[in-house]
Image: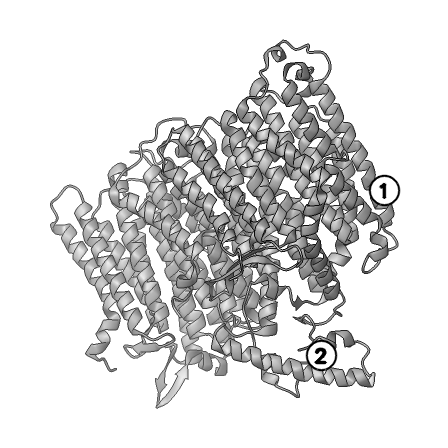
Amino acid sequence: MSFKAADLIYLLPLLVLAVSGMLLVLAEAFYRGKDRAALMGLAVAGAVAAAVSSIVVYRQLAPGEVKPLLSNMLLADRFGYALTALFSVVTALAAMVAPAHQRAHGWVHGEYYGVLLLSAAGMAMLALAGNLVTVFLGIETMSIGVYVLCGLRRRSRRGNEAAMKYFLMGAFATGFLLYGIALIYGAAGTMAFAGIEDGKAFTLAERLVDSPNRGLVVAGILLLVVAFGFKLAAVPFHMWAPDAYEGAPTPVTAFMAAAVKAAATAAAIRVFAYGMGGDILAYGNFGWASPMVVIAAVTITLGNIAAIRQDNIKRVLAYSSISHGGVILVGLAALGLGSGTAQTSLMYYLIAYSLTTMGAFAVVAYVGSRDNERLHIDDWAGLAARHPAAALAMTVCLLSLGGMPPTGGFFAKFYVFKSAMEAHDQQLLWLVIIGVVNSAISIYYYLRIVTAMYFRDSKGAFEPSRSAPLAFVMAVCPLIILEMGVMPGFWLKLGL
Amino acid sequence: MMPGAFILPLLLGLPLLGAIFVMCTPKGEHALHRGLALVFTTLTFLISLLLLRYFDNRVGTYQAVLDVEWIPVLGARFKLGVDGISLWLVLLTTFLTPLTLLAAHGAVQKHVREFTAVMLILETGMLGAFVALDLFLFYVFWEVMLIPMYLLIGIWGGQRRLYASIKFVIYTMIGSLLMLVAIFYVYVQYASVTGVYTTDLEALSRLVLPHDAQLWCFCAFALAFAIKIPLFPLHTWLPDAHVEAPTAGSVILAGVLLKFGIYGFLRFAMPMFPHGAAVMAPYIAILAVVGIIYGAFVAFAQDDVKKLVAYSSVSHLGFCALGIFSLTAMGVSGSIYAMLSHGLTTGGLFLGIGVLYERRHTRRMAEYGGIWKQMPVFSGLFLIITLGSAGLPGLSGFIGEFLTIFGTFIAGDTFPKGWPDYLPAPRLLGALAATGVIFGAVYLLFMFQKVFFGPLDKKKNGSLPDLSGRELTVFLPLVVAIFLMGFFPRPFLRSMEQSVQAMLQTYKVRLAEPDGPARLQGDPVPDAAPAAAGTPTAMNTAAPGPGDGAALDAQLRDLAGRAQGAAARIEGAAGASAAVDVRANGGTP
């Protein structure tokens, strides 16, 4: 166990998030003001500081350089810090969406900001994880925060239901995760992805391949796949997601859909690609890519079909997010099956998807008026005539979710499917076809919302929850998405 | 930089700039929005005329090419250019857009600012798809066109606009996304052969795929294009979209968007997957003939004028599809000519229906009759357009239809692989298609008779004003162009000729490539087992990423290819292997 003070800089984003989270919890306790908007400012400052420090560290690392920290508990590399920056930015955006929604719907709780940042600290840990223990810690830190956020509207029945469902399912998934980790440890004798023992370098993947207990390895890997299936809301482990997304306050839903899913993906990339990558573990009938491929196909399809039948916008977005989780699994499987571009494509996908989702939910938060969240699609009729900017922002986000050019969402899907085509001698062609056909289907339900906004006449006046930070989120997300779609070059180089 | 390379980016940029300008002006200033849009589109048209000045009829290659790096990681380039196939389609687009905008002054009264902006963005999308020489760029433009059209139908459309707009988008998306999969496939195959990632059309067109892969890829592309044409039985979205769309939407849809199907076949599907095209050609030709006759019959049964013209589009585009799959120079040129003519005449018909609809708010033919007495100028112009559409000699429609039918007639003699015995002979198809011309004349003239002749017995029709000056400005250029194309086909055909020949030549050369694993055109067929003797690494490793490594790998691969080529030559000389195409070996560098 050696720790140099110089290494502290690599922990800076993590520390900034954690410390500012704790400070915010304290500040909440001593804060006497009626409005919690000042706390929002503090939270945004903390998150932005974390993002800036991640970028600073990112620039210090050379491309491809991996620096083990804290005896391999964490891996500092460009991939991790790019994701940390993303999570911090999304956290800041989630904080900015909140005040207007809190005022309009009567859940002015300052805890929101503190818990938000602590949860983000868990995400940062996942992005940098280098050990199964860190993965577990990160997932729990992140999840417990989100359970709390989910139930912040204490008097709302739906909110309680959401929090309870999410918590129970999350606890269940934790069980799978822990059991999987235990079996893997049993087979490999280590939980670090790589390290040095008795003067010899080893990796988890090698140990697993050499392990005499083939059954343990297979069972452990399967349990981990199931655990991440829960976290990514992949079919058939998705049951909690629509209810949790619908019941949670909109800013929290935005945070769950945008950041939590991205963080779970980051963790999955770390565990499967860094921990159990290589030429053997992913392949074959018992390799981890096989269940992922199957789950991916089912998830994309069922998520889409279920979304068609929804009338509640939050549920539409929830099911759409499930089907996007399927696309992420396609990328993960491609990563395992030796596609050289899969990791960058996932990186791009996560950025585009997170910002798009954040933008879409920001508009959902904006449209809801006092005590009426206006979540039914019919409630959105005629939005374009009354609030053209909001309708335009929503349209860009929806088109991006549906994968229409020239948005980031199009390019993200394009790149993930392209990397899947390259994997394993084009064995994933059928999966790509399923994914692509589903994109066409998904256009239907996204355009239903656009149709309502643009083509139908409104029934009553809109009383949107106006606030400057919210407007900022609604403006910035679509702009970045468009920029990503037109000039993807810069974004594709991140995380390499 | 090629001479004239500045034109194409200007063409794409101007309408987009116009859209931004229009959106920046205050809402409600209708005259300002319309004026700005007209200025920008007219300017675009004038600049597109410059293309004619720079265009060289004597070569069949791409001209006015602009080639800029865009997404280096992916190998996608911002590459634009025109040849004889796309030149006139570009001009058709820039010609029709200002006329359409001018015609819409009366009909579109709500959200005028948004309407003009959407039209301008649509123009950028259409022009982009016609001039893109990079598959990725083409796909982006191809999809970008969808949304403005969807908005046009959905916001400014008729009663059932919600249904029609969604149907339009879903139909088109399903086709185009399968095309995307085929693009992936070609892209990845090219990279695994050469080690270079690129979506450049000219590079990808040199890739020879195994025959069954060609068939699949061709079918994926064909689905996208056949829906767009629309080929029977994939045409059902078209009547809905046309009937519900506002006049401007119908004009652009019929005048330009439908052409992308034919254009896509010519530019992408046929040269890239010649074997697939050869296998599928008879079937597509039969579907095209079915579409010609079916469209004509259904058009005849309509009482709604707009529906009639919509089904007439199905029939007319059938001629275009038939022409290109005759795979003769005459048929292909005729098909392009017919597309241009269809853009002018059907666009004109829709504009005319728009004029009537604005005055009477009905499209039922039974509600009209005797309009000639009331609106003589309009009736005269409309008659010319109708006759042009029906294919009267001396007007634009005749030449295209004649050439496509003639091309089909002689297709049997030149058809590369011969027609399967169980399919009707091309001569029969040509004869059947020719009946379509007669039916076309029948339903169009009946329509004209019902609307314009007869007694003026409906009271409401008694006070219809004739064309205003603005409307006259819309129709006159169209009629002039129809006459011009009818009397002087030579300059149009001459500028197509070389490109069509070049396209067919490429097609034939590539069709002659024997079946075998993916390789570059002209390279010898690699053995099923990788070249063990020469440089094993180059053939076996998975495709590496772009960059220096890729370049090195490409060199290695090139070397391996040469070594193999030499080996194959020796074999060929010894007469040991009949499978090796000696002609192909001669082409190796």
**Which numbered marker is on residue A32?**
none
Q: Nearer the viewer, residue B51 or B405?
A: B51
- Mark closest to the chain's N terminus, 2 or 1: 1
User: The residue under label 2 is which amino acid type?
Assistant: Asp
Numbered disc total: 2
The image shows residue B534 at horizontal and vertical percentages of 64, 87
Label 1 SS? helix
Q: Say which residue appears at 58% left-offset and 83% top-offset.
A: B537
The quadrant where residue B439 appears: top right
Q: Which residue is mark 2?
A: B527
- Going 75% across and 26% down the picture, which residue do you hit? B445
Q: Quadrant of residue B508?
A: bottom right
Q: Which mark is residue B431?
A: 1
Q: Position of residue A173 (x, y in %)?
A: 41, 60
Asked if residue B394 lies left or right of residue A340, the reply is right
Q: Chain of mark 1?
A: B
